Image (cartoon, rainbow, N blue to C red):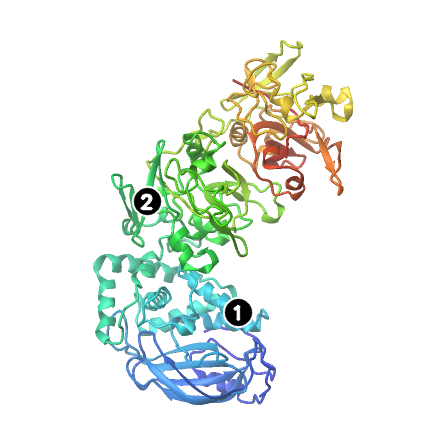
Amino acid sequence: MKSNLSKMAQGCFISVASFALAAYMTACSGSDDKSVAGGTSDDAGIIANLDVAGLSQKGPFVKGSAVTVQGIDCKTLELTDELFEGEVKSDKGDFAIDSVTLSASCALFEVTGEYRSEITGKKSSKEITLHALTDLKNRKNVNINVLTELEYERLMYLVTEKGKKFAEAKEQAEKEVLAAFNIAGSFEEFENLNIFEAGDENAALLAVSVMMQAETDDAGLAKRVEKFADSFAETGKWKDDKTKVAIEEWQVAATADGTLDSIRKNIESWGYADVVPAFEKYIEAFGDTVILSSSSKDVEPAETSSSSAKAKAGSEYDATANTLKDLRDDKVYKTVKIGDQVWMAENLNFETAASSCYNDSSKYCDKYGRLYTWAAAVGKSEEECGLGKECNLSSGNVRGVCPDGWYLPSEADYATLIEAVGGEKGAGTKLKSTSGWNDDDDESGNGTDAFGFSALAAGISNAGYYGVGYTTSFWGSTECGSEGVPETGNGSAYAMWLDYDDVNVNLRSYDAKDLGYSVRCVKDDGTVPESSSSEVSSPSSSSIALAVPCKTETEDNCEYGTLTDDRDGQTYKTVKIGKQWWMAENLNYASLQPSDSLGSTSFCYNDSLKYCEKYGRLYFWSAAMDSAATWSENGKGCGYGVVCTPTFPVRGVCPAGWHIPNRDELYELVLAVGGENDAGDALNASSTLYEQNPYGFSFLPSGRKRIVWFDNDDGEYIYDDDGEYGYIWSLTDDYWNSDESFTKYHDANELVVVLSVSKAGKVGLHGSPKTSGYPVRCLKD
């Protein structure tokens, strides 16, 4: 087994990968460092006359197997010459070594011998060696097992090469080992686990012990463990795809042919287990969220697995009883039909890597389901789709972590749900459960649960846990850019958010993928939701056909038209992109209609007419929406500080027959010209700054008018961004923004979605204050 761990203080090199302790003793026999670390967590002081006991298990090691305990420095992990010997007392694998005295509290345990195989029920034909590296400061019992072996080299590497403290390194290594087998949860330390006792952690140990020997013999097991350590020590990742495939193929067959039942009977027949832990669920789940093929280096979602794995990982839906049974772990969920959709009426509680229980406590999982990172929710690895990664999921419904026949909702699915309950305004109250929302203070945050969706205040995880009783978020499968959230890098994702003090619901487009959110799955009827004409509808990327670029440096084959505004006689060029007809110029109608305390007017950049001639006018949102109802009633009263419910379509300040686009119509434009990565260049106007414009849209770097706030809470208007950014108003309220300068001075009802394009070609849909002045591009009714 290969290892490149650190050289010790005396110049000796410890190859912690070796299965033979004699190699350690020979390499470091010259060590005479007996210092005591003064009782720190890294080296807790002298251990004197300690009687230690434990169990040695692959299956159980047989009577007479050799057990040793050797001292090791907790800081350097340098072995000492303090060695104590014993043996396994019975075929249960139990051992005891008395009067262990060490100069430091850390110790290396080793067992070598034959063992009883869980798979065959018989004694192994060859000996194996397993290790456990532990701190004896507060323990007298140490079990040696497959999990302590698998964490062993990684733990050594984290301490000697990465400088981590022993306890911190051990906690990290244990989580990484479990994640390698798609097991998540808050478990006890590995040296506490016992395959003869009930409990999820003991079930996980037994499952891993079985899977490591699946489809191989005793010699193959030793090689498999050795190969696991080869890459895992330095990376914390199990990169042996060939072995994973072998285990996956065995697991599918073992589930179908009764092998798992035979394993349970073998263990029961030994007579040492009062209860055999429910190991089957972890074996059956292996590969459900991570399915590998021999030619693949990346994890794939369950929907791309083999047909046999699909059949095993099914579900049972009872439309009469309104229940869903997830056959991966046999959990049963309530379901509810809302409009044309069938939703889970409870949060998903299927264990995967990169998911957790709130506060790492199973009682919260029982009540609220699990919290998943976005990568876990879509059934991908963190390396492929985690924080800062652009995942580029294939079109269509994404099953992800959901049961077979169900899928993770897209932004469009959430929009359809919101439309079915009457729109964003008041949807939060209708979707929230009737209890549990800020109940400690009062019941004002509770909902009516009018449609049976029963959203719970499950909280979220974000380098910790918070928000139970106050908030919840549900992941969507729709990926988006991270404009305005630079710390996340490219590739954030949509989520539906509910809060105790908000009667509305919010679809957010910039949530970092490492956050832990809840999951609600939708029944897959084989279709992809289409965008509707309502304000809250959202187009899915699969439902929008790419428009064909129509303009080059030498040719212009775009489909143009003209629009004459009969209010002032101005004529504008228009252009067809996909199925939409857009103004190809910014509106330049001089709206002067007082409707609120801001005067609701329009402006030329820098108060100069030459900018109006070049860029069109800048409008407050109230003016863009025609809040005074001068031309239509649909946007009446929609201004600063007002929660309004406009009637779609909103003509606003646009000429007759045209309207202010909503968020989803702007998003449809972005999708039609190639998506968020390409839309900036595709929409920009040709000039010395903007050299694209292949669709004739001619997005202009118009700048904006905005308030600059000072520490004394005063502010003043300025013009900025001319030549750097262009903007377009939408009619869609935005209820959240990550920029503290916004949330400090603006309430939830003061932000609206705008489309922005930067000089560098970055495009974004994000919230901006209604007090800002932005251009208007009108869309044909």
Mark 2, secondary structure of its residue: strand
**Above or below: residue 429 compared with residue 305:** above
**Above or below: residue 389 compared with residue 689:** below
Residue 518 percent coordinates (x, y): 44, 48
Measure the alpha-carbon separation of dots 2 and 1. 41 Å
Quadrant of the rendered image containing residue 452 = top left
**Above or below: residue 227 compared with residue 10:** above
Residue 172 percent coordinates (x, y): 50, 65
Please tell me whether mark 2 or mark 1 is closer to you in this view. 2
Residue 515 percent coordinates (x, y): 52, 50
Inspect the image, locate mark 2, and give the three-letter code of the amino acid beneath it.
Lys
Task: Report if residue 558 is visible in the image.
Answer: no
| Residue bearing mark 2 | 334
| Residue bearing mark 1 | 169
Q: Is residue 185 left or right of residue 42?
A: left
Residue density around tag 2, few if under 14, some if 14–19, many if 20 or more, within 10 Å: some
Q: Is residue 74 left or right of residue 320?
A: right
Residue 544 percent coordinates (x, y): 46, 30
Q: Earlier in the sequence, mark 2 or mark 1?
A: 1
Q: Is residue 332 left or right of residue 704?
A: left
Numbered label attached to residue 759: none
- Residue at 55% from the left image edge and 56% from the top image edge: 463
Inspect the image, locate mark 1, and give the three-letter code of the amino acid beneath it.
Ala
Q: Foreground: 135 or 382?
A: 135
- Image quarter in which the N terminus is found: bottom left
Task: Report if residue 157 is visible in the image.
Answer: yes
**Above or below: residue 598 compared with residue 127:** above
Residue at far front of view: 442
- Residue at 25% from the left image edge and 63% from the top image edge: 260
Q: Foreground: 659 or 301?
A: 659
